[in-house]
Image (cartoon, helix red, strand yellow):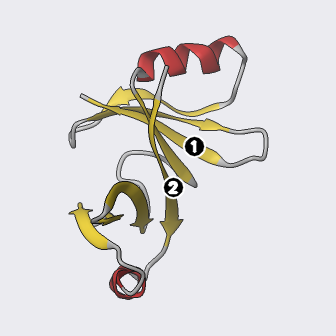
Amino acid sequence: MAVRRVVPNIQSEAAQESREFYGLLGFEEVMNHGWIMTLASPSSPAAQISVMTSDKTAPLAPDMSVEVDDVDAAYAVMQRIGAEIVHPLQDEEWGVRRFFVRDPNGRVINVLGHR
């Protein structure tokens, strides 16, 4: 299994202010679904930050997103080790397959793959 990118998720009600602030550091908006906005570096597109008010289909907002090349394999590994799955593996309408798992520090990780 290969990691494609890692994105910190900032839960915030200040999306516009965040876009402006991170824009000063060189980030540009690359995705906006209303409840989540992703900003990326034009010179290094995998360098990203997401700002979200809440998660559209999950009971809580994740702290970080990890995109992998095989989300089903990642899910199987997490189940095998008995990790706490806090949102089940599912296909989302915006083109990703994902699940949430709690890491040993209590952080919620959104593990995803694009379909």
For mark 2, give the secondary structure.
loop
Q: Are marks 2 and 1 in contact (CB under 8 Å)?
A: no
- The residue at the point 42 percent across, 68 percent down is 53
Can you say whether 73 is above or below 98 in the image? above
- The residue at the point 37 percent across, 27 percent down is 90
Q: Residue furthest right?
A: 105
Q: Residues within 10 Å of mark 1 (few under 14, many from 20)?
A: many
**Quadrant assignment, res 39:** bottom left
Residue 94 location in percent, x, y?
A: 21, 43
Residue 29 location in percent, x, y?
A: 26, 70
Q: Nearer the viewer, residue 52 or 7?
A: 7
Total marks in image: 2
Q: Give the quadrant of the C terminus.
A: top left
Can you say whether 105 is above or below 12 in the image? above
Q: Nearer the viewer, mark 2 or mark 1?
A: 1
**Quadrant assignment, res 109:** top right
Can you say whether 25 is above or below 95 in the image? below
Residue 76 location in percent, x, y?
A: 55, 13
Q: Nearer the viewer, residue 38 or 86?
A: 38
Can you say whether 62 is above or below 79 in the image? below
Q: Residue furthest front?
A: 43
Residue 17 location in percent, x, y?
A: 39, 88
In the rendered structure, find residue 61 and report the number of the disc placed on it: 2
Q: CA distance from mark 2 to mark 1?
A: 9 Å
Type of the residue with mark 1: Ile
Type of the residue with mark 2: Ala
- Whether residue 105 sits left or right of residue 16 in the image: it is right
- Whether residue 89 sits left or right of residue 34 in the image: it is right
Q: Read off the residue under disc 1.
A: 109
For mark 1, give the secondary structure.
strand
Q: Residues within 10 Å of mark 2 (few under 14, many from 20)?
A: some
Which one is earlier in the sequence, the residue at label 2 or at label 1? 2
